[in-house]
Every structure is written in C-alpha cells, then in structure tokens.
C-alpha cells in the first residue's frame, strides 16, 4: 500500500504521540518535517494535507489521516497494539485518563495559544512560562489522582504501554521545558521512568527527531 509518511514537527506533542505509537507498532516511516516556527503548517502545500493546518498528518495504508487521537485509535485497531483494556468500563476509564492531558491540558498549552495570550497581555516577557505553568501542574496533579484507580505495573494501567502513557510523556516533556515541576507526583515519576526505559519511547524523544 506504499510507504508510511509522517508529517511531523519535533516539538509537537501530538506528533510525539504518533512517533511513540509507530515505534511500538514496528512501523517504518519517513518523517517529513513541517516547521511550525517558520509557519510551514500554514503553507498552501500543508493546508492541502490538513485544512486545519496542524501536525501530525500520517499517510498510511493508502490513506491520509489527521488528529493524533484518531490516528492512535486506527493504529491500535489495525495493528493490535493493546493501548486500551478490552473491558468497556475499564476502556472508558483508561481513555478518560489519557484524555485528561491530551484533551484538557495540551490544547491550552499549545504554543500558538500561549503566543496569543502573550500578545493580549501586551507582550509580557514572562507570559508564556507563567501561562504554561498555570495549566500544566494542576493538570498533572489531576492525572496523578486518577492514577490511584489503576494498578501500575509499571505503566499507567498495566504491564505494557497504553494510550495514557503515550499521551502523558509528551506533556512531561513540556513540563520540563517550561519548568513546571512535577517531582511531587510519585506515580507520574514512576511511569516516566518506565517509559524512559522503553526503546519505542526513547526513539521518539523530540531531540531524536529535531
């Protein structure tokens, strides 16, 4: 069905999620960088791929897919990654855990949003970091509390990486980038250590892709 192509930006959290999943699935892919800083995501060429002007975009199995969470579902369903439990109730709880960072924290901590907030503040120099810290740590605190409902062994909900781990790790990268300390959250720190020892995660690390 042709080669797999990932239109990617190294620091994009959503792209980071897909790099992890593609690695877990053992899918070889070609990464095509779309430089968000240079505005390449707003180019006519990229808007033809994704009218929203976002990354990632994944070309796979003869299709062009957008929206990282939808793509993760596709990879899970077609490559049997086991990212979510089979039981419907546990599946909903695990998905809610993942979405607590991917849907609630990530969008407001998108750099585009922070830049707009900075512009509205009159260009306050400390605005981006203050904005990020305001949302990241409380979001991670909630994630930590939600983790109490699962048995970590050693990943968020079991012995193998799942959707929550894939969504959490990019947010922890951003937390460190913006100095939003989470050392007071031991469950999250334990999950981070487990993921950091997994080659699929380490190969997807932004500095490996930049």
Image (spheres, rainbow, N blue to C red):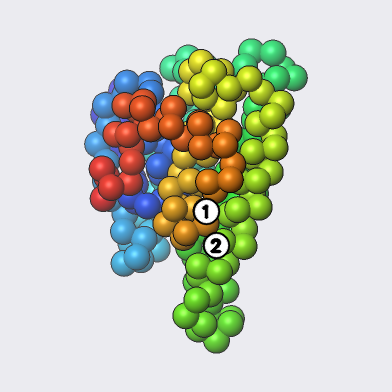
- Looking at marks 2 and 1 on the same chain, the residue that comes earlier in the sequence is marked by 2
Which residue corresponds to the image point at 36% horizontal and 36% vertical from the top-left? 19
Residue 62, compared with residue 52, is above or below; it is above
Residue 188, compared with residue 79, is above or below; it is below
Which residue corresponds to the image point at 57% horizontal and 74% vertical from the top-left? 117
SS type, badge 1: loop
Query: For the residues carrying marks 2 and 1, which lies nearer the camera in this image?
Result: 1
How dense is the environment of label 2, judged by Cα within 10 Å: few (below 14), some, or many (20 and up)?
many
How dense is the environment of label 1, judged by Cα within 10 Å: few (below 14), some, or many (20 and up)?
some
Q: Which residue is mark 2?
A: 132
Residue 210 appears at what percent x and percent y?
26, 50
Q: Nearer the viewer, residue 36 or 47?
A: 36
State whether residue 14 appears in this view.
Answer: no
Q: Nearer the viewer, residue 202 or 22?
A: 202
Query: How many numbered marks does the figure carry?
Result: 2
Residue 26 appears at what percent x and percent y?
32, 21
Which residue corresponds to the image point at 63% horizontal and 20% vertical from the top-left? 151
SS type, badge 2: helix
Q: Which residue is mark 1?
A: 181
- Between the residue at mark 2 and the residue at mark 1, the CA separation in whole angstroms equals 11 Å
State whether residue 206 appears in this view.
Answer: yes
Residue 168, compared with residue 191, is above or below; it is below
Q: Nearer the viewer, residue 139 or 4?
A: 139
Q: Quadrant of the N terminus?
A: top left
Residue 86 appears at what percent x and percent y?
64, 13
Q: Quadrant of residue 153?
A: top right
Which residue corresponds to the image point at 51% horizontal and 15% vertical from the top-left? 159
Residue 92 appears at what percent x and percent y?
71, 26
Residue 27, compared with residue 8, is above or below; it is above
């Amino acid at each position: 069905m042709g080669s797999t192509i990932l239109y990617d930006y190294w620091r994009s959290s959503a792209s980071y999620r897909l790099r992890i999943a593609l690695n877990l699935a053992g899918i070889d892919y070609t990464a095509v960088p779309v430089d968000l800083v240079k505005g390449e995501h707003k180019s006519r060429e990229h808007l033809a791929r994704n009218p929203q002007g976002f990354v990632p975009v994944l070309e796979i199995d003869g299709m062009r897919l957008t929206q990282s969470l939808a793509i993760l579902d596709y990879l899970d369903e077609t490559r049997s990654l086991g990212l979510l439990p089979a039981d419907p109730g546990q599946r909903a709880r695990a998905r809610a855990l993942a979405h607590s960072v991917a849907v609630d924290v990530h969008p407001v901590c998108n750099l585009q949003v922070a830049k707009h907030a900075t512009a509205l503040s009159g260009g306050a120099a400390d605005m981006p970091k203050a904005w990020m810290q305001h949302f990241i740590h409380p979001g991670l605190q909630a994630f930590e509390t939600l983790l109490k409902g699962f048995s970590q062994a050693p990943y968020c909900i079991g012995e193998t990486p799942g959707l929550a781990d894939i969504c959490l790790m990019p947010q922890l990268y951003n937390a460190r980038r913006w100095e939003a300390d989470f050392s007071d959250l031991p469950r999250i720190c334990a999950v981070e250590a487990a993921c950091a020892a997994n080659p699929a995660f380490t190969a997807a690390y932004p500095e490996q892709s930049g």
